Image (spheres, rainbow, N blue to C red):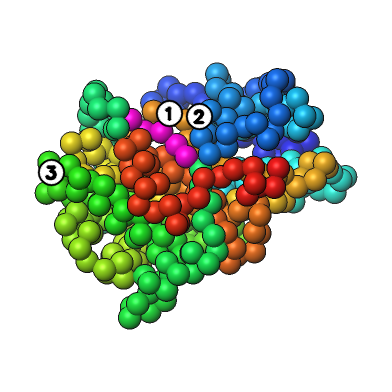
Amino acid sequence: MAEALASYYVLGGEVGINPTTGEPEILCSNGGVEFLEAVADVELRELNLNDPYQSIAKFVSMKRHGVFAIQVTELKCGSLVVGCTFDHRIADAYSMNMFLLSWAGISRTDVPISYVPSFKRSLLDPRLPLIIDSSIDQLYMPITSLTVPQEITNPDNILTSRIYYIKADVLEKLQTLASNGTGKRTKLESFSAFLWKLLAKHAATDSVLLTKNSKLGIVVDGRKKLMEQEENCNYFGNVLSVPFGEQRIDDLIHKPLSWVTDEVHKLLESTMTKDHFLNLIDWIETRRPIPVISRIYGTGFNDGPVFVVSSGKSFPVTRIDFGWGSPVFGSYHLPRGSRAGYVMTMPSKVETDGAGDWMVYLHLTKGQLRFIEQEAAHVFNPVDNDYLKI
């Protein structure tokens, strides 16, 4: 760990406020990371991994200070659970994947770290003169514009999480249906559209929501676009954008899956460009020192369903080997307190090739999850020990 932190020294620092600008900044204080050792009187096969708040959450410590915290828990059967918490302002999942692979590699061998991080901050410098794209105003807003969250009185509207797996052949069928007559769409586009339709159908059970719109956001990584001239894409930080689209619930329900998938494709097509990220950087520069946030997180519960999809296909679960073998399970985890639904797709440990099964982490309302399990049980299978071969 200490050797890995020598290269990823940012993780051993802390976030402070610059007294001149009033903005957060990283203080590379060499303070180290919080490292907690724990034991649990439970066996791996007894964990309910389908319900993260009854299992995973217990092995992820709350970060009290600094940027990064780790909890290593030994189970009664001898298994180890490694849980990590990090400050998302400082790093995104891509950055943490690089660190985990480097940390695991150093633990196994004496070779140098696998991924040397780049802290070339100039990649995110604004252009001079600034080029202001007014369309960014439709996607982002100052964080001061966020309203106070409404009190949730209906238990079905409480956000919670579940983890499912989707078989490879089911994903292929979804992709075929979603690509009907429109050119082949990606699995992520097809899955996002399918889930968007499902949540719209659930909203239609409430006559008040039937006339509303629904919003879908998709997390886009800008590394490859901004680092076209670089030898690698090992920039460590947060280089994400969350563009979103909005459609009438009635259209999402009654129009074919291929139409919904086309709308998802258009959303991504307009933002997966270098210009989008350069425009976003310039726009943020005009708002400093006030932090900004995607407008999709400013939606209230009286609006239609709102959720964000993120692709975790690069999650290297099978390669995070500390010397005792490949993990039998790995997942991202979202703590309570989110203002919108969140969905993370990940490669399954059972099928490791690109065309294999998916693990899907759904952070949605209790009512939405119950509806999904009733209406799409042929797609969403609860993760259990039989599937994971524990």
Decide: few, some or many residues near mark 3? Use Cα within 10 Å; few <14, some 14-19, many ≥20: few
- Give the residue at mark 2: 53
**Residue at (25, 27) in percent of width and height:** 154
Q: Which is nearer the N-term, disc 2 or disc 3?
A: 2
Look at the numbered discs 1 and 3 and tell me whether their residues touch, using CB distance below 8 Å.
Answer: no
- Give the residue at mark 3: 207
Q: Position of residue 340 (x, y in %)?
A: 33, 38
Look at the numbered discs 2 and 3 and tell me whether their residues touch, using CB distance below 8 Å.
Answer: no
**Residue at (58, 67) in percent of width and height:** 355
Splitting the image into 4 quarters, where does residue 68 fall?
top right
Query: What's the CA distance linking mark 2 and mark 3?
Result: 31 Å
Tell me the amino acid under the disc marked 3.
Ser
Splitting the image into 4 quarters, where does residue 197 fall?
bottom left
Look at the numbered discs 1 and 2 and tell me whether their residues touch, using CB distance below 8 Å.
Answer: yes
Q: Position of residue 292 (x, y in %)?
A: 33, 38
**Residue at (72, 51) in percent of width and height:** 319
Looking at the image, which is closer to me, 255 or 60?
A: 255
Query: What's the CA distance linking mark 1 and mark 3?
Result: 28 Å
Quadrant showing the C terminus: top right
Residue numbers of the magenta segment: 158-162
Q: Nearer the viewer, mark 1 or mark 3?
A: 3
Decide: few, some or many residues near mark 2? Use Cα within 10 Å; few <14, some 14-19, many ≥20: some
Looking at the image, which is closer to me, 198 or 90?
A: 198
Q: Is residue 145 above or below residue 217?
A: above
**Residue at (67, 39) in percent of width and height:** 8
Residue 160 appears left or right of 210: right
Tell me the amino acid under the disc marked 2.
Tyr
- Give the residue at mark 1: 336
